[in-house]
Structure formats: structure tokens, C-alpha cells
Amino acid sequence: MSTIYLDNAATAWPKAPTVADAVASFITHDAVNTGRGAYDRAWETAGRIDGCREKLATLFGAAESRNVTFTLNVTHAINTLIAGLFTSADHVLVTAMEHNAVMRPLTHLAIPYSLIPCDEDGRILLDEIPRLITKRTRAIIMGQASNVTGTIQRVREVASIGAHYGLLTIIDAAQLPLSSTLSLKDDGIDAIAFTGHKSLLGPQGVGGMVLSERVARTVTPWAYGGTGSKSDLLTMPEFLPDKFEAGTQNLPGIIGLSVAMDYIQENKEAIIKREQETTERLLSYFLSEERLQVVGPKGMEGRTSVISVDFPFLDNAQVAYELFLDGGIEIRVGLHCAPTAHQAMGTFPRGTVRFSPGYATTDEEIDRTIESCRRVLDRLKPQ
């Protein structure tokens, strides 16, 4: 049975068609380290890594490419920012739609927080922000888009409110939609945590932070070690990107991300169009189906390709399993590492069944998914 991959919110697949060859070629021919060797291949590799850094700086509106620092993933980036900026004496605001990449570090470090409430579509209520600010509040931390509902938040408006009250604005861009912009400079953001393996179509194991000068000076790194620079010191260099890049980075992954971004640049309009078409096709069916409920935005405006549905009279996990058995539909079911989001949307603890088409999803695959969903619903009896 052929499968249909609709779990791109977890990781994009297939990766950009240029990625595998670039990674394999690097590992086979050029996998030397950067900043450690006084020979041509080491310098060439450093140049390729810096090239990826420059592309990310352009994408996220950083003042300079050095303001982009690499991490293992977006979760490590968020942990670095939270642990390096705040203590239990501080207070932060987060949205009710946040992922555990934000909620668990705050909880573990006992950093007080308040949840900004949202409406029935998962959009935060901007008017509620001022009343939640206290004398100890230092930042607003929020996801650009929800991994549960696909809701895209009004980042620029939030950052403007934060700036008015002297707060940092930190954005989790894990679910970055290519159809919207996210700019440190243009949106008034202080830090963006990103990942390379989702909408950027790169391999797993590469993420990072894009930092304003203010945050770069203030945040304390959590990892310390060799950087290939200032080796006479027993302390980390204070300059970027070395301050946050202790040890050897995932160079093959960064090379893969770099060529993936080239592919996106050359095909961006087609990628966006394909994802919007397949998402609209699937969403239209879900909205017409009385035996399920769409959780989150009911239209295409202000949403990503993530669609969550609840089968109120069935076991969501059983539906997901039956869809795989019936049509090879590869999707995710549960709380999606975002329990506060499900609490806000009224789907806790049962969760939802999440469908997330990608740039390679075809109309035929969406049609097969719809047909499979109809067959499963016809077969299963309400509980």
C-alpha cells in the first residue's frame, strides 16, 4: 500500500530535492571542520556555513549575518533564550497557544508567566495584554503560528505593544509559513528561534537564533567550549556568532539547509501556491463533513497548512489508526506537545487529529485522503 504523508507540521518530507546530494557530497568529499584547520578545505567549509548564515539573516531581517547563530533545533534555541535571559525573579507573558518548547523551560526554571487568552480560532486577544503586565514582566514569548490550529498570530502588533511597555518580544518560528514574512528589523522583534527541517525543507538537526544587538549582549550562553577563536581564553568569546556556538556544529545539516533555501528561493511562489491549494481542498471537505469538527480557523486567511479536526463521537486515536490502515494516511494524533493550546481550544485531554499537507502533496493524494476519511467514518460506530 502506498502511503500519503500529511505530517509536514512535524517535519517536512520529502526534503528539498537538492538536500540529499549536497549532504552526501559534503560528507564524502569535504567534511572537515571550520575554524580549526589552516588549509583550503577548512576555509571553504567556513565560507559555505557563513553563506547559509547570510541567507538566514536576509530571510529574518537581521542587521548582520553574525546575528544568526546555529543550534541543534528550535527547542534548543528557545531554551538558550529563556535560560539565558530570565530568572525566577522575572515574569513573562506567553500565549495560550504555546508549544512545550516554551512551556517546559519556563516551568523547569520556575519562571513566572501569564497566559494571554485567545479567541475560538486560536488568535490571541491583543487587548488583554496590558492588564497582564506587572512590574516584573520582561518579555512576551510567542509562536508565530500554532502547530495545533495553524493560526498565524499578529506578530507585529504584539511586538509594538511589547515595545510600548519596554518588553522584549521573542518569537518561536517553528511553524514559519513561507507565505508570511517575519523580520527582526521590520516587525520590531528582539529574537527569533527557528528550525530548518520544517517549512525551510532542510534536514533535521539544524536550528538557531536570530538576535537583536540588545539580546545578543544580554543573553548568557548555557554551553561553553571550543570555538576555534580566542583559544587563549578560558571564557567564551563575547562576539557573535561564537558566543553561542561552542563545539562542532552540525555542518552537514547546515550545508543541507543552505541548498534547501536556494531551492525555496527559486520555487517559492509555486511552493506557497501548492500548499494553499491542497490545504483549501482538504479544509473544504472537513467543513462540509458533519461527523467531525475543525479546530481553529475555518477559512484560509491567517492560517498555515496545519488542519486539526476532532471526531467528537469517536476515539481520535482510533480514527487516525484506521485512516492509516485504510488509505496509508500518515498523520499525527494527540496533544501535539501543546497541552495549553488544547486547553484553550477545548480539546484537552482528547487532543485532535492533525493533517498538514506540504509542497509535494498532490491533489490526488488529498482526494484519496478524503475518500479514506469517508470510508472510515461510515465504518466506525459512534461511542
Image (spheres, rainbow, N blue to C red):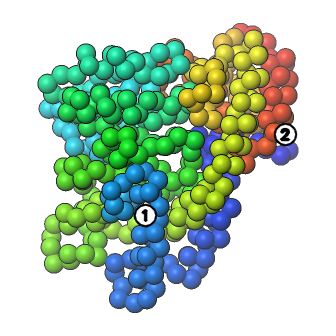
| Image quarter in which the N terminus is found | top right
Residue drawn where x is 47% and y is 15% of the image: 119
Q: Nearer the viewer, residue 136 or 31?
A: 136
Residue 152, position in %: x, y? 51, 31
Residue 298, position in %: x, y? 63, 20
Q: Nearer the viewer, residue 75 or 272?
A: 272
Residue drawn where x is 79% and y is 25% of the image: 373
Q: Nearer the viewer, residue 283 or 182?
A: 182
Amino acid type of disc 1? Glu
Residue 293, position in %: x, y? 66, 16
* The image quarter in which residue 235 lies: bottom left
Which residue does the numbered mark 1 point to in the structure image?
Answer: 54
Residue drawn where x is 76% and y is 30% of the image: 281
Q: Is residue 187 above or below residue 307?
A: below
Q: Is residue 120 left or right of residue 158?
A: right
> Which mark's residue is nearer the viewer, 1 or 2?
1
Q: Secondary structure at mark 2?
A: helix
Q: Secondary structure at mark 1?
A: helix
Q: Is residue 185 above or below residue 125?
A: below
Q: Which disc number belongs to residue 156?
A: none
Residue 364 in view: yes
Marked residue nearer the N-terminal end (1 or 2): 1
Residue drawn where x is 29% and y is 71% of the image: 227
Q: Which disc number belongs to residue 364?
A: 2
Amino acid type of disc 2? Glu
